[in-house]
Image (cartoon, rainbow, N blue to C red):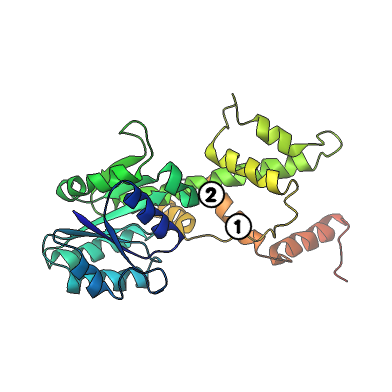
Amino acid sequence: MHLGMVGLGRMGGNMAERLRAAGHTVVGYDRDPEISDVPSLEALVEALPAPRAVWVMVPAGEITRATVHQLGDVLEEGDIVIDGGNSRFSDDAPNAAVLAAKGIGYVDVGVSGGVWGRESGYGMMAGGSEENIAALMPVFHALRPDGPRDEGFVHAGSVGAGHYAKMVHNGIEYAMMQGFAEGYELLASQDDLIPDVPAVFKAWQRGTVVRSWLLELLVRALDEDDDLSQLDGYVDDSGEGRWTVEEGIRNAVPLPTIAASLFARFESRQDNSPAMRAIAALRQQFGGHAVKSLE
């Protein structure tokens, strides 16, 4: 199957390069003409003999929906569209229906691996029909990490399952990152007792139950900036942590750790938290506790 890539940003561009290195011919389209192989979606389709697969790596939401509709107008029956971005799983069924009316397949793929995926491979969670997944397996095999075939890739279920699995993956990631961050802060607060916090984290990379790729990345960050003083404490969220918590509420599944990690990110964006000011005021009122006034 001949492959097109829509969206050649950092992730899409790296994926295209990994596929090319594996021997796949990839034609890429991006709105930035400096990095695009073709000038339009129409030209992308014309450059690919049928049957085609077009992997979409653009921002979630309206941009993805518009791209899917545009591809539905230019692709042919038997082609497949892959949404590999961080779309909400509930967008997948409507997108698939638009394409199915024209005989075009649809597969949603949650992708993890970040900037390291080009060399190390990407973890992928796919949703779609058995037929469409089977047709795309050469592509998935080229992108996944080396190792056992039941690791690094999963056909998670029908349309929407790939993005749902990736949503939960990212919710867990939020919680793991928050745990490492809180541990870092506590260790760093004990500078008389533990003078070299980066050394502790580095030691944890071998033989401990918390060893992980996230731990390795934190060690890398501490190697570059041993007290993280070059960074602002503002932490954004991509949306998937929110969706995970919303799904927990919708299904009455308790997610206290993931929810707390999401709310911690919200707190990071407040220079002078109104909630914390209210708590300080209450402590002063009922207990006479000392408070700090803004100058």
Among numbered discs 1 and 2, the one appearing first in the sequence? 2
Q: Position of residue 86 (x, y in %)?
A: 40, 58
Question: Can residue 126 be seen here?
Answer: yes
Q: Quadrant of the C terminus?
A: bottom right
Q: Position of residue 162 (x, y in %)?
A: 32, 50
**Disc 1 from disc 2: Cα separation:** 9 Å
Q: Position of residue 47 (x, y in %)?
A: 21, 67
Question: Can residue 251 be seen here?
Answer: no
Q: Which residue is mark 2?
A: 174
Q: Which mark is residue 265?
A: 1
For the point 30% across and 74% down, which residue is it? 66
User: Within 10 angstroms of label 1, few (less than 14), some, or many (20 or more) residues?
Assistant: some
- State which quadrant residue 159 falls in: bottom left
Q: Is residue 71 above or below residue 199?
A: below
For the point 44% across and 45% down, which residue is it? 119
- State which quadrant residue 54 falls in: bottom left
User: Within 10 angstroms of label 2, few (less than 14), some, or many (20 or more) residues?
Assistant: many
Residue type marked 1: Arg
Residue type marked 2: Tyr
Q: Secondary structure at mark 1?
A: helix
Front-most of residues 244 and 170: 170
